[in-house]
Image (cartoon, helix red, strand yellow):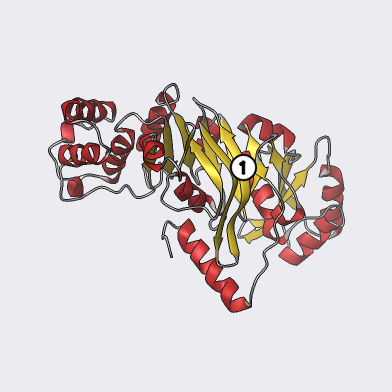
Amino acid sequence: MIQVRHLTKLYGDFAAVKDISFEIEDGTICGFLGPNGAGKSTTLNILTGYTAPTEGEVLIDGRDILKEAEEARRSTGFLPEIPPVYPDLTVYEYLSFAAQLKGIKKREREEEVRFRMEQLNLTEVKDRLIRNLSKGFRQRVGFAGALLGDPGVLILDEPMAGLDPKQILETRELIRSLKNDHTVILSSHILSEVSEICDRVLIISEGEIVAADTPEHLESASGAGTVLCITASGSLDRVLSAVRTVTEVREDNVTESESGVQVRVRLRDGEDLRLRLSEALFAAGCPILEMKQEKADLENIFLMLTDETGSGNSLQEDGAGSGSSQEETGGGSGQEETGAQKAAAADRGEERP
């Protein structure tokens, strides 16, 4: 179980993570989503004990990561986006070394390494140098290292990044198989995979939790409704002006290509603007080439929440989210820029003092 209470991380006067709280129950696979620079990697680094929070506490299986650091780390397996493997070691040598670092007793080490190699289908390459393995196999080696010692909590940062479709399917099934014995939190930019695998989703934007629920409930409770996709002939300005006589639409929801101008209009539940939009575009001399409706999925909800964080939109279960609203205060622009740069570096996995 993972418990996060009033977690804050400051870089100078810049708040990379702002007073967030959430819990992930045992046996849950939780997707952790956020745009670049939102505080996602900073939060994961805090959960693993790599970065200390400015305020708040994190409990891993009931152990405080600061007060009981060694015990909490033994309960945590971490797979970074780039697995920390040694290219000049063989698979077997690396996993044996990692098992030793994790404090697995010598008499149990051989059996544990052998079991993880079999679990990850690595036995056939156990004597090959890691530098000669494909990205998919290197990812498996990192996964095996995270599982050594059978930690109760697994934290996976972009576990499917750079994998081919077959490897993604294999990784998906592996993560599902871990559910009964582990609590899993994974970050990913592949939102379809998060919907497919995860029981619960957390979305962070600008350092705050803006959604915490199941994927299914987010889709029904988001108010995102249906997305109406229109392709029309004419100039971008003329099409956009015609659509705006009927409903508001953001400029980043309008694109122009050789096939015409594409507009994405969010519809609330029960709303039907097809006739009015057709009439407005016809009157503007912009004939419709295509019009179709798409049900709001996790990707649309993610875009809606992260685009509109500043307007106060959030979808959270009780007990999850930001404990209080914080305004960023502090010195001049030079100091704020330094803090922002440090936070961005940390969110890319580059820890700064």
Q: Position of residue 151 (x, y in %)?
A: 37, 31
Is residue 292 visible in the rendered image? The answer is no
Which of the two residues, 172 or 236, is positioned nearer the viewer here? Answer: 172
Q: Label 1 crowding class (10 Å Cα cut-off): few <14, some 14-19, many 20+? A: many
Q: Is residue 324 visible?
A: yes
* Left or right, residue 1 beside residue 307: left
Q: Which residue is mark 1?
A: 21
Q: Position of residue 142 (x, y in %)?
A: 30, 41
Residue at 14% of width from left, 41% of height from top? 128
Q: Residue at x 29, y 49 (%)?
A: 84
- 227 vs 258, nearest the viewer: 227
Q: Nearer the viewer, residue 37 or 78?
A: 78
Q: Nearer the viewer, residue 343 or 89?
A: 343
Residue 85, image x and y in percent? 25, 47
Could you tell me residue 137's position as x and y percent? 26, 40
The furthest residue to the left: 127
